[in-house]
Amino acid sequence: MYEKENTQEGQPSNTIEEGKTIAIIAYITIFGLLIAFLMNNDKKNSFASYHLRQSLGLGLTSLALSVISIIPILGWIVSLLGSIFILVLWIIGLMGALNGKEKPVPFLGKKYQEWFKSL
């Protein structure tokens, strides 16, 4: 019923179902990420934690692009193109959460898992 990609151990579908709501909330603004983090803090769910790491990485990458936008002209162009790219990655991550998949976002998803593995 649910596909599992790029994880080390298989999870029962009830683990995915339990964490699905938290995973979806994690992608809805920075406040959603904070709420999802608090919801997952009580009872750790590996599926929700996976998507929390992806969402946190996307948020921090977006913040870095905002800092780059301070640079006139070139920074604006990089920030605009980067923001469009982050939006596409965000949609891919959200679709993965909705479909019950642990598939990293392209290019940076595996790094996000590595950098934020303590969450």
Image (cartoon, rainbow, N blue to C red):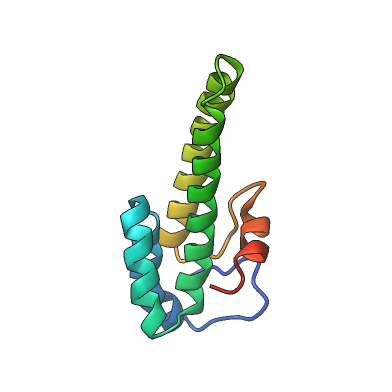
Task: Give coordinates of residue 88: x percent, y percent.
Answer: 50, 39
Res 51 visible? yes
Of 69 and 30, which appears nearest the observer? Answer: 69
Q: Residue furthest top?
A: 73
Residue at left 68%, top 57%?
111
Residue at left 35%, top 73%?
38
Res 20 visible? no
Residue at left 36%, top 53%?
30
Task: Give coordinates of residue 52: x percent, y percent.
Answer: 47, 64
Relative horizontal placement of residue 26, taking residue 116 as reference (left or right): left
Task: Give coordinates of residue 18: x percent, y percent.
Answer: 37, 78
Relative horizontal placement of residue 25, taking residue 97 as reference (left or right): left
Of 107 and 3, which appears nearest the observer? Answer: 107
Placement of 86 over or under 51, stated as above or below: above
Placement of 19 over or under 80, stated as above or below: below
Of 49 and 79, which appears nearest the observer? Answer: 79
